Amino acid sequence: MTGSRDRRELVKMKEIKAYVKAHKLYDLTHALRGIEGLSGMSAVRVEGFGAGRASASTKTTEDSLELLKPHVKVEVVCADELSDEIVATILRVAHTGLSGDGCIYVSRIEEAYRIATQSRDDGML
């Protein structure tokens, strides 16, 4: 694609970041693999706390670190038309009904670059 091509003509992409309980990773990976058109996902183990979990009364850094709970951050970049299905899948599979199930963020992707060619690749959008 040329740089002069109107951005509205590009395929619209979304980035979905989901923070889920670590024990849900296997089931979530399996469910996401079943979505036709989804080309991949990334996952990284993280520690953190959510709303209502931070305590201003902790006395030391060590006390604060004990409040951190293990989660997994799952990241997916997909065509815009897949985002609703992916979010619905994450909501269904990651839900336990308990506090701390996690959260999902959806953002637009504005630009994409291929590291191998060291160039912008509008074809990824």
Image: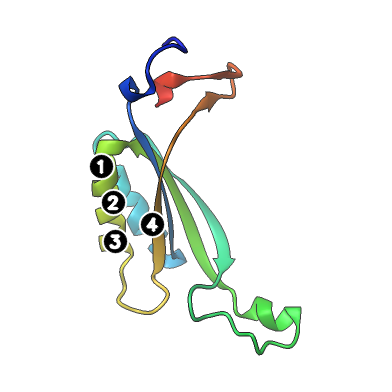
Say if 67 sits above or below 123 in the image.
below
Q: CA distance from mark 4 to mark 3?
A: 15 Å
Indicate the position of residue 11 as horizontal and vertical percent values: 32, 26
Indicate the position of residue 105 as horizontal and vertical percent values: 41, 54
Say if 33 sits above or below 23 in the image.
above
Callout 2 environment at 10 Å: few (<14), some (14 to 19), or many (20+)? some
Q: CA distance from mark 2 to mark 1?
A: 7 Å
In the figure, is residue 41 to the left or right of 69?
left
Q: Are marks 2 and 3 in contact (CB under 8 Å)?
A: no
Residue that badge 1 annotates: 35
Indicate the position of residue 112 as horizontal and vertical percent values: 49, 28
Query: Looking at the picture, which amino acid does disc 4 mark?
Result: Tyr
Q: Residue at x 73, y 80 (%)?
A: 62
Q: Residue at x 39, y 13 (%)?
A: 5
Q: Are marks 4 and 1 in contact (CB under 8 Å)?
A: no
Residue that badge 4 annotates: 26
Q: CA distance from mark 2 to mark 3?
A: 11 Å
